[in-house]
Amino acid sequence: MGNPSPTAQLTGNSRMDSDRSTFDERDTRRTRSLPSWFSVIPFLALGALALGMALPLGVILGVLLGLMLLLAVVASVHHAEVVAHRVGEPFGSLVLAIAVTVIEVALIVALMLASGEAANTLARDTVFAAVMIVCNGVVGLCLVVGGLRHGAMAFRVEGTSPALASIAALAGLALVLPSFTTTTRGPTYSGSQLIFAGITSLALYGVFVFVQNFRHRDYFLPVEVGDEDTHAEPPTSSVAWTSFALLLVSLVGVVGLAKALAPALQAGVKGIGAPESLAGVIIALLVLLPETGAAIRAAQANRMQSSLNLALGSGLASIGLTIPVVAAVSPFFDFPLVLGLPSMQIVMLVLTMIVGTLTLGSGRATVLQGAVHLVLFAAFLFLAIVP
């Protein structure tokens, strides 16, 4: 077959330029102004939350709350993308990770203060579930979705490896060591040990944020792959600030609706005879839905580094912010705080760190690595039901 004629090449190039121009115009309209439904949904979610607090939870109300939860997640993802497009990477990922984690920590502390000793493992279960969700579930989904569409996914190993190392260190310090200390009985820290764990967790997370966003920001920028999203104009400052405010409202709705649905989830868990910790896993899954959606969208656009910034940043924020806050409020608890993981969960955590190191150590990953992480995530979910 001969080479195409210059006229055919020109026609093809013109068609490609036209397609890209159409995409840019559509994406610019999407980010420079806010669709009205994305502005209304966060407040509808708050209205549904108020309704759920005022009325007993029945089937119809449960379906309504579940629908509003999904809509609030979609709105959260949209507003997070608008903010991220304005401030650029990796600041955009940091905004969503910290916003979700701060609300999650507030929810954990409120439930622990309200439930008493019955919730003495809530912080441990939530943090462990968050680490397993982001390191296996989110990373695996992003690699599979992105790999099926783009082939091998590229990212910066100089950014992902330190992030995973930080997660491993924080998880070991907060969730593994309490099972082996001898100052107190059981998988707990003494007061001084808990303070030390809180200070070091916050310090390490602070160093990571400094390195990610200032000192070595280029290590966490998406790999240039010629993605069309980079050609779209960023939103205006007013649109970005509006999206940031609506993002916070949406996240409050997501966490609040997840909490409102928690009694039904707990009743369902007891009904099938599963461990009580499964309810915490389900709540963690609901709370992390906005980050999961944003990470998958980034992977679909061939921005795997942005997906990893979201996933690993969420895991780090979950440990780095939860443990210090729990340590600070621990004097208000009249019961010991259980942080140490059982042996089975320690094995799952170690296996996750080993597989994560192998996946993120080369700078490129395929559908196969994603499938491995999803298998580990499926094992985590299965063992949460059948320990």
Image (spheres, rainbow, N blue to C red):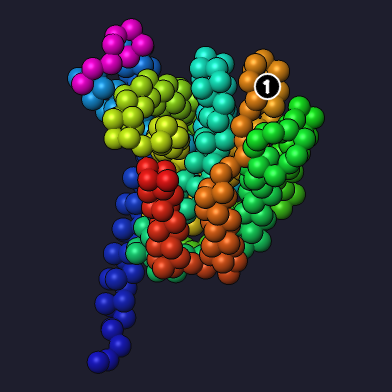
* Residue 334 in the image, given as x and y percentages of width and height: 65, 16
Q: Is residue 19 left or right of residue 340?
A: left
Image quadrant occupied by the N terminus: bottom left
**Picture quadrant where residue 87 is located:** top right
* Residue 149 in the image, given as x and y percentages of width and height: 35, 63
Q: Is residue 211 magenta?
A: no
> As rendered, which of 159 and 185 lies closer to the eye?
185
Which residue corresponds to the image point at 29% horizontal and 35% vertical from the top-left? 272
Instruction: Name the residue beneath numbered marker 1.
Output: 330
Which residue corresponds to the image point at 75% horizontal and 49% vertical from the top-left? 215
> As rendered, which of 221 and 70 lies closer to the eye?
70
Q: Which stretch appears magenta?
A: 52-59
Query: Please, is residue 149 above or below residue 250 in the view?
Result: below
- Residue 27 seen: no
Q: Is residue 237 left or right of residue 16?
A: right
Q: Is residue 55 magenta?
A: yes
Q: How many marks?
A: 1
> As rendered, which of 381 and 35 lies closer to the eye?
381
* Residue 270 in the image, given as x and y percentages of width and height: 33, 29
- Residue 57 seen: yes
Which residue corresponds to the image point at 27% horizontal and 91% vertical from the top-left? 2
Query: Please, is residue 249 above or below residue 378 in the view?
Result: above
Query: Please, is residue 291 above or below residue 368 in the view?
Result: above
Looking at numbered disc 1 in the image, what kind of residue is underneath it? Ser
Q: Residue furthest top?
A: 54
Q: Secondary structure at mark 1?
A: helix
Q: Is residue 359 left or right of residue 47?
A: right
Which residue corresponds to the image point at 69% horizontal and 30% vertical from the top-left? 324
**Picture quadrant where residue 207 is located:** top right
